[in-house]
Image: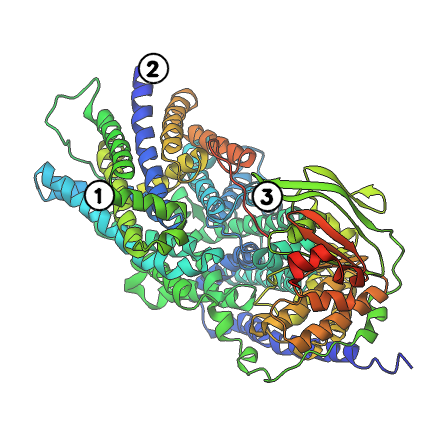
């Protein structure tokens, strides 16, 4: 009977994914065919331009993951091109070592690029935006200076000859096809990442970092991996660049090139592969059409950058996004289907309770929490109410690791929860939502929910790069589970819509769906009813009760007494960081002090 | 030898400190770091050389015009690259918009002024050597700016209004302070300070478009190490940076001096991202 009542989600998810896949692949197939047939249209100078576009794209494809997906403003990436170019050229020329074969030099350039990509990127783990941008800029300045000064190796200002690949890739078109093939492979690999849990995790780090942490995404490891990949392709691109130039001097690696790479991505748009690809082609080809303007090209790129930032921050990708122009149906209602929850959440292992013991935390002179005891049991809804500033959200933030208590202990089934290890909470199946929904606005609703299941994937980054079976299995599993979670909260019809087009109340339910992806043993909700209509609050209450009945321990921080008294098994009332009262809803309702202080008679 | 290292180190350190103060003045008014800080320094040198050496204007008039030019560019920065993106500070679009503006000016200079470093005129008719004007001018400029800012902030109404904006924009606006005009005035002031840095240090740095990214980077080091918005920290860190750089220049050679500066900068930032002088705690959830 119950299985009959649960139709659809699975098959609909498949259809949705596959139609989207075909439509999205078309432009790439077109570019592939055009690129393969290019030598037929003529040659000479255009061959060089096309090769250059391929060489640039090899670098930009990797940088795109750093800038377009992870949102790290890396403006000095030309430094890695320089390193790759000099590594390959110097090795082949034999200035420092016995001469090395060109292919081996290419590979070594990739390794050097990967190492330095990691070194340049690591500050991003600690530093924010402008600081990181400046460090990459500084790195770019220094690499050129070293290339200029280290004459015995790099030839200084005189330069060094670029490596020549052996036949059949020594001819002009031979080399073009070599670069084209690498560019195509890079496109394919980065598109695989973009459509994987790693790509979604990167956008989550960019747009909703706290939600990424709460979903168990380890930012340092993921960013480091991406920097290594991006550095490797930049190094390889540098080696190809040296071959294309046939002779390199430090002058060839001005900051202008870095700007070109960077702007190609911004023109293209964030979280897109096609956009930056078109941007790269455009910026490589454009100066050739406007020969008198070549001297002004960097100036024009800068103008373009300003215009894009001020006028169309979404870039080409947003202009091409026809699907999201269609209006969403109006008068939508959210109808959760709690009967799906057991299938989604499975049968939870009894993980014991979360207990707070004499927890205290002050900010400056303000005692936000002052000796609080609390117990959240599996299978029950625990309400935390109190006036503004009574320490409700602070309590939730201590449990989920954003604050460290100064006194007392937070335990899960008797073991102390590690302080500040936010993303570790997800591995312990502790999920949470936020007072202001933390959503990746440019991603679809489905993708947003899939972010919640990131830690349940088994494949590695490399497996996703190459679309190996485990990657495909992960994706299918995450998509099905996310559709199920969306159906459970009543939003499966909106799965393909861009999340920033939804109403506030819908975002709250998306956050719950994302949290459910963890199959949480404990679910912590921060004012889930804020901004909801009375009808929606009622449905939310039924949903939360059903989640608890499936075995999850639920903590609700709320202002709405109705919701709390309707669904909670146990209520704690806070005032000025201290417990004012605790007990069953009936007890609280008749508690004299609570009624006087808070419920207002 | 030691004397000349100290002399040039302090002088160059004063230039870095002034660019750092330029960053800070803009930051205080808008919570935004602007890539145009180093560009202002570059403009100070180029405009000074243009007005005084090429057009033959008197030095006093040249100074005024350079400061005015910097001020105007400051206002343009505020209007074009900062104001439109202030509403969405969390998207960090200002990094890109100010970078775009800085690049535009830098490229324009490269094309119209040339890509070679050109000489900067001697400003005062004094004999060369010893405690030369090329060293003491940046120091004097730095001292003047520090004292001037201190007087402005402590003893004038408009200066206190600047401080109020820096401390709490919303509260300042609620008090009826004209936040927009004050921000614009701050950017004009920052522009003049940045241009003065390049002008006073013109003889050391020359009139060269490539100074823009160089000063953007080295001028930010004092800000990062001294703590953002902290002018005294910027001066101390700027002087240390200048001395360290010149000493490393002498001891291990120019290139590895830059590498050393970069390495120290990164390591200090990684250990103390909030700078050596100040601490900050931000609330995210």
Which residue bears the numbered disc 3? A118
Mark 3 packing: few (<14 Cα in 10 Å), some, or many (20+)? many
Mark 1 packing: few (<14 Cα in 10 Å), some, or many (20+)? many
Q: Quadrant of residue A385?
A: bottom right
The chain to which mark 1 is attached is B
- Visible residue check, residue A35: yes
Q: Residue placed at 70% from the left, 44% from the top?
A: A421
Choose the circle earlier in sequence order: 1 or 2.
2
Cα separation between marks 1 and 2 = 31 Å
Cα separation between marks 2 and 3 = 38 Å
| Residue B36 x, y percent position in the rendering | 33, 48
Which residue bears the numbered disc 1? B46
> Which secondary structure lies at badge 3?
helix
Say if A257 sits above or below B230 in the image: below
Instruction: Let me know if marks 1 and 2 both belong to one chain.
Output: yes
Say if B117 sits above or below A340 in the image: above
| Residue A125 x, y percent position in the rendering | 58, 44
Cα separation between marks 3 and 1 = 37 Å
Instruction: Let me know if marks 3 and 1 both belong to one chain.
Output: no
Q: Is residue A25 left or right of residue A485?
A: left
Q: Residue placed at 66% from the left, 62% from the top?
A: A599
Q: Is residue A186 left or right of residue A147?
A: right
> Which secondary structure lies at badge 2?
helix
As drawn, the label of residue B2 is 2
Circles 3, 1 touching at the beta carbon (< 8 Å): no
| Residue B95 x, y percent position in the rendering | 42, 53
Front residue of A233/B57: it is B57
Circles 1, 2 touching at the beta carbon (< 8 Å): no
The chain to which mark 3 is attached is A
- Visible residue check, residue A217: no
The chain to which mark 2 is attached is B
Q: Quadrant of residue A15?
A: bottom right
């Amino acid at each position: 009977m119950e299985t009959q009542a649960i139709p659809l989600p699975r098959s609909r998810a498949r259809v949705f994914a596959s139609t989207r896949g075909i439509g999205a692949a078309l432009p790439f197939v077109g570019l592939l065919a055009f690129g393969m047939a290019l030598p037929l249209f003529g040659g000479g100078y255009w061959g060089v331009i096309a090769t250059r576009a391929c060489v640039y794209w090899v670098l930009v494809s990797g940088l795109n993951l750093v800038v377009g997906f992870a949102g790290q403003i890396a403006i000095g990436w030309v430094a890695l091109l320089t390193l790759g170019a000099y590594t390959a050229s110097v090795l082949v020329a034999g200035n420092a070592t016995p001469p090395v074969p060109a292919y081996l030099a290419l590979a070594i350039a990739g390794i050097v690029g990967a190492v330095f990509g990691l070194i340049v990127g690591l500050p991003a783990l600690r530093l924010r935006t402008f600081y990181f941008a400046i460090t990459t800029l500084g790195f770019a300045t220094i690499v050129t200076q070293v290339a200029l000064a280290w004459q015995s190796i790099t030839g200084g200002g005189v330069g060094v000859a670029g490596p020549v690949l052996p036949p059949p890739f020594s001819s002009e078109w031979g080399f073009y096809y070599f670069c084209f093939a690498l560019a195509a492979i890079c496109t394919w690999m980065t598109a695989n990442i973009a459509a994987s849990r790693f790509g979604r995790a990167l956008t989550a780090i960019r747009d909703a970092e706290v939600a990424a942490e709460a979903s168990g995404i380890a930012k340092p490891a993921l960013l480091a991996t991406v920097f290594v990949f991006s550095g490797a392709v930049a190094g390889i691109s540098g080696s190809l660049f040296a071959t294309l130039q046939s002779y390199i001097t430090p002058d060839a690696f001005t900051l202008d090139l870095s700007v070109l790479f960077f702007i190609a991505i911004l023109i293209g748009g964030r979280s897109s592969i096609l956009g930056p690809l078109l941007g790269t082609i455009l910026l490589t080809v454009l100066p050739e059409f406007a020969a008198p303007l070549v001297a002004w090209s960097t100036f024009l790129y800068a103008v373009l950058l300003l215009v894009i930032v001020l006028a169309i921050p979404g870039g080409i990708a947003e202009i091409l996004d026809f699907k999201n122009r269609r209006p969403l149906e109006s008068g939508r209602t959210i109808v959760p289907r709690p009967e799906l929850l057991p299938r989604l959440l499975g049968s939870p292992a009894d993980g014991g309770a979360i207990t707070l013991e004499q927890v205290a935390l002050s900010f400056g002179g303000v005692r936000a929490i002052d000796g609080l005891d609390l117990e959240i049991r599996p299978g029950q809804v625990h309400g935390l109410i109190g006036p503004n500033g009574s320490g409700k959200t602070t309590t939730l933030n201590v449990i989920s690791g954003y604050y460290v208590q100064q006194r007392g202990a937070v335990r899960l089934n008797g073991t102390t929860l590690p302080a500040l290890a936010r993303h570790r909470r997800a591995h312990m199946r502790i999920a949470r939502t936020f007072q202001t929904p933390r959503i990746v606005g440019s991603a679809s609703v489905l993708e947003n929910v899939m972010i919640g299941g990131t830690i349940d994937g088994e494949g590695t980054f490399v497996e996703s790069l190459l679309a190996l079976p485990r990657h495909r299995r992960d994706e299918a599993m995450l998509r099905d589970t996310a559709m199920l979670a969306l159906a459970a909260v009543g939003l499966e019809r909106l799965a393909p819509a861009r999340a920033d087009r939804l109403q506030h109340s819908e975002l709250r339910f998306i956050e719950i769906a994302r949290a459910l992806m963890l199959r949480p043993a404990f679910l912590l909700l921060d004012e889930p009813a804020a901004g909801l209509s009375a009808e929606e609050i009622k449905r939310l209450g039924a949903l939360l009760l059903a989640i608890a009945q499936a075995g999850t321990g639920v903590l609700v921080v709320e202002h709405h007494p109705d919701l709390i008294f309707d669904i909670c098994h146990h209520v704690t009332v806070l005032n000025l960081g201290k417990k004012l009262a605790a007990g069953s809803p009936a007890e609280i309702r008749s508690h004299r002090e609570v009624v006087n202080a808070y419920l207002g008679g | 030898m030691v004397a000349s290292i100290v002399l040039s180190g302090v002088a160059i350190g004063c230039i870095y400190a002034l660019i750092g103060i330029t960053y800070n003045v803009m930051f205080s008014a808008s919570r935004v770091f602007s890539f145009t800080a180093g560009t202002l320094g570059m403009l100070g040198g180029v405009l000074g050389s243009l007005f005084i050496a090429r057009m033959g204007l008197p030095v006093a008039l040249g100074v005024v015009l350079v400061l005015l030019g910097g001020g105007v560019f400051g206002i343009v920065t505020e209007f074009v690259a900062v104001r439109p993106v202030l509403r969405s500070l969390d998207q960090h679009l200002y990094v890109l918009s100010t970078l775009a503006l800085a690049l535009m000016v830098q490229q324009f200079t490269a094309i119209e002024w040339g890509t070679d470093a050109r000489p900067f005129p001697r400003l005062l008719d004094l004999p060369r050597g010893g405690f030369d004007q090329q060293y003491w001018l940046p120091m004097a400029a730095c001292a003047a700016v520090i004292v001037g800012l201190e007087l402005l902030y402590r003893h004038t109404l408009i200066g206190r209004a600047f401080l109020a904006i820096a401390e709490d924009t919303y509260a300042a606006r609620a008090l009826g302070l004209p936040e927009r005009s004050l921000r614009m005035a701050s950017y004009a002031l920052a522009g003049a300070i940045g241009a003065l840095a390049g002008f006073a240090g013109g003889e050391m740095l020359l009139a060269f478009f490539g100074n823009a990214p160089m000063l953007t980077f080295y001028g930010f080091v004092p800000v990062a190490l001294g703590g953002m918005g902290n002018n005294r920290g910027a001066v101390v860190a700027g002087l240390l940076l200048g001395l360290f750089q010149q000493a490393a220049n002498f001891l291990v050679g120019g290139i590895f001096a830059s590498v050393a500066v970069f390495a120290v900068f990164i390591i200090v930032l990684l250990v103390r991202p909030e700078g050596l002088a100040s601490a900050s705690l931000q609330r995210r959830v």
